[in-house]
Amino acid sequence: MALDGWMFLGFIMALGILAYVHRHKLATQKIVGNFIYITMYRSKVGIDAMKSIATKFAAPIRLATPFIIGLGFLGMALVSIEIVAGLYSLIMNPATSAGVALVLPIKAKGVFFVPFVYWIISIFVVVVVHEGAHGILAAANKIRIKSSGLAALSILVPIVPAAFVEPDEKALQKSPAKSQLGVLAAGPMANIMLAIILFGALVGITNPLVDSAYQKDGLLITSLAEDKTLPAHTSGLTAGMIIKSVEGKTIEDLTGFQSIYTTKKPGDQIAMVVQEKAGSDKMMTLTATLAENKDKKGEPYLGVFFDQAKHAIIDSWWVPVIEWINQLIVWVAAMNFGVGLFNLLPLGIVDGGRMLHVALHRLLKEKHANYTWVAVSGFFFFAVVGSLVISMIKG
């Protein structure tokens, strides 16, 4: 097991020990019997800060609330379509990548791997932003916040750390639909908005800083698709080679490669000059006959995975620091975006499910609203679980 896996295992053990030592102070919210549950440690931390922000920015919050709700439902529609389309593609085309995966610092089937340090920092940012936004909107709508605190999603033992803000549920349910929807949509939309800001920082600040320290040297082939009949294998390409030119045109980065690659169609030949490996003087010309992309009919497919080949032109302490920060921003942004969208699903246990519940009870009679909500929530529960199971089986 890699270092990240051991760190994650140690973290789980530490969480388990803490949960046991403080078991009398913990509350449990069951999801699936005693197998999957949420463990909570209630406190008052951060409540005064949330109230202060809500009071100070009361007018902008009231103005933004309808937009937050509208964008929340738009996000719900988009992520619902994506989940259904992804599941359909998984069933109809086994080669399709799963659209849903567990995000953990371990390498395993059906798991999207994130290095442990980036994972734990990203989780912290996600939960603080998400729950803080819920609390601020609750306070802005004069809904009492009963408690806040730390939590953990547990599968027999605590695994994923979290946090929570607990508004007075009775007061929330008695408040106007607009207030309820605003509180519920605030968390996921805050995550998505932060992700957009961070992606902007990547494009405008940290990526250019990192790029300025290096000279691009072509495309490093990191791995090849498993199918041995694909042109990447039959042409003689191997991991570690660096593509230096295509069709006589020098290639510095992926943009340059794609400018030629996208003009091709299945069956076309493509000539590449490759360097045997970084630092080698050996160059060779390889020719590949492009296959058809199974996921995108009519488009060419080579069957290689790339990274940017480069060498440093600035030797300074700040370069690795900026690179680490840049990578951290990538993970924090990606996890905020993913968690925000997932929480907009019309699934009973997340914010989107509760938003749908409020909306249906405004539009339909109670009996029909309840039946519709259970049916929709149940469908997406099985869609998500189905996608996870298929992705784990496929690996």
Image (cartoon, helix red, strand yellow):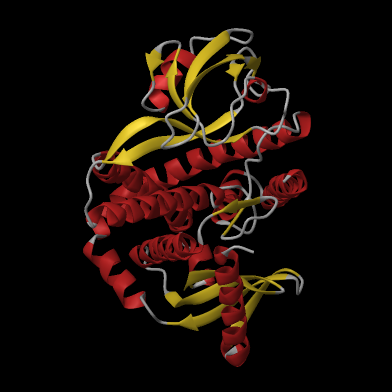
Give me the residue at 59% from left, 31% from top.
238
Q: In the rendered view, does 85 fall on the left or right side of 119?
A: right
What percent of the width, then of the height, locates residue 75? 50, 41
Q: In the rendered view, does 368 fall on the left or right side of 271?
A: right
Give me the residue at 51% from left, 47% from top.
341
What percent of the width, then of the height, locates residue 86? 66, 35
Specify whether residue 349 is in view: yes
Q: Is residue 167 above or below residue 328?
A: below
Classify the position of the N terminus by image quarter: bottom right
Specify whether residue 61 is in view: no
Q: Nearer the viewer, residue 9 or 219?
A: 219
What percent of the width, then of the height, locates residue 71? 43, 41
Q: In which image quadrant can residue 12 be found?
A: bottom right
Give me the residue at 57% from left, 35% from top.
239
What percent of the width, then of the height, locates residue 257? 44, 21
Q: Nearer the viewer, residue 346 or 285?
A: 285
Q: Residue furthest front?
A: 281
Give me the residue at 55% from left, 70% from top.
7
Q: Is residue 142 above or below residue 275?
A: below
Q: In the rendered view, does 381 fall on the left or right side of 50?
A: right
